Amino acid sequence: MKNCVKVRLISLFMYFFLLFPISSVFTEIKYELKGKVLSPRGDPLSGAIVRINLLNEYTIKTDNNGMFLWTDVKVPAFVVDAKHPDYSDCKAMVIVDPMQKEKFVLLVLNKIIELDGRISNANKEGIPKARVYLECYVGGYSSSGFGKYYQTETNEEGKYILRGLVPNHPYGLAVYAEGYVRVVTEPFIVFSEFGPNYIIRDKLSIKMEKGNKVTFQVFGPDGKPVPDAYVTVNGNNWHIASGKTDINGEVVLSDLPLGQVHIVVNTKQQYKQKEYLYKLNKDEIVKIMLEESKNE
């Protein structure tokens, strides 16, 4: 009986190896990827660096015809990206048909988009080391997850430059500088004439106002100061500054604008939230009276 079982097992193994030779069982499957990198006008780009993400050994430069080729890719699905100094990066998801074991991909690089400008004060003097932030807006909402979040600092002349923006999408710019009122722009689209190497350039210069220092004093209905109250000052749909009152019920907020602002006061104690519009004057003291919260 045992001999009979052994004979059957040997017969099965022989049948298996006749159908699937040893070389095919233990040989690693390889895929071929070829492609071409083009400019926005359809011209081939030589010297572009093409890479398969997560596989560092797969990095190659395009030839004079913008072509690249790999014959030994070990995975059937991956992301390939292309870089060129005169254009913005391009990425593409590639899935190779396991039956064909080869794939052709066409990568078209977008125009580089630049935004530059100058940040200055009321005397037209450049503001150095101002922090410039740029973020893409989708459907009216800021969304850093949608694309890149850009940031830079101005140089000694107050100039800045942001490079590699996404075309045809609205942006919002925010500028911070110590001693000045924060500036936040309305959404805008970067657009200008073509420059050399198909670079789109646009300019946005900002004039900043000197910041205003305001002391907020928060009191309860009994006239006693309220510590640990959160005072928030907002502009037109954007946050300006906030802080928490000390044991004397005071908080000093700097770099505030003159004119109308939106003030919100919250506290964890037994007081109602207070929210109202207020016209700020230069270096003033703002007294805020809170009301008791009534339990229903």
Image (tube, helix red, strand yellow):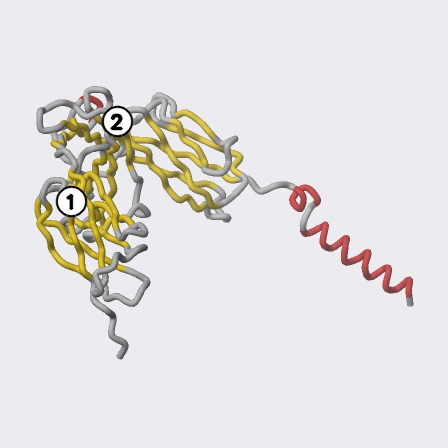
Disc 2 residue crowd, few under 14, some 14–19, many 20+, Cα 10 Å: some
Residue found at the far bottom of this picture: 296
* Residue at 42 percent of width and 34 percent of height: 34
Q: What residue type is disc 1 on?
A: Pro
Residue 10: image x %, image y %?
82, 56
> How many discs appear?
2
Q: Which residue is mark 1?
A: 187
User: Looking at the image, which residue is at 51% across and 40% down?
Assistant: 31
User: Residue 49 bears which disc, if any?
Assistant: none
Q: Secondary structure at mark 1?
A: loop
Who is closer to the viewer here, 225 or 57? Answer: 225
Q: Are marks 1 and 2 in contact (CB under 8 Å)?
A: no
19 w.r.t. 48: above or below: below
Foreground pick, 24 / 227 = 227
Relative horizontal placement of residue 7, taking residue 213 as reference (left or right):
right
Q: Residue furthest front?
A: 223
Residue 152 drawn above or below residue 155: below
In the rendering, at what x and y percent does residue 227 appear?
A: 30, 55
Q: Is residue 147 above or below residue 288?
A: above
- Identify the image quadrant of the C terminus: bottom left
Q: Which residue is mark 2?
A: 129
Q: x, y percentage for residue 283? A: 14, 40
Q: Residue at x 13, y 44 (%)?
A: 284
Left-right relation of 291 to 96: left
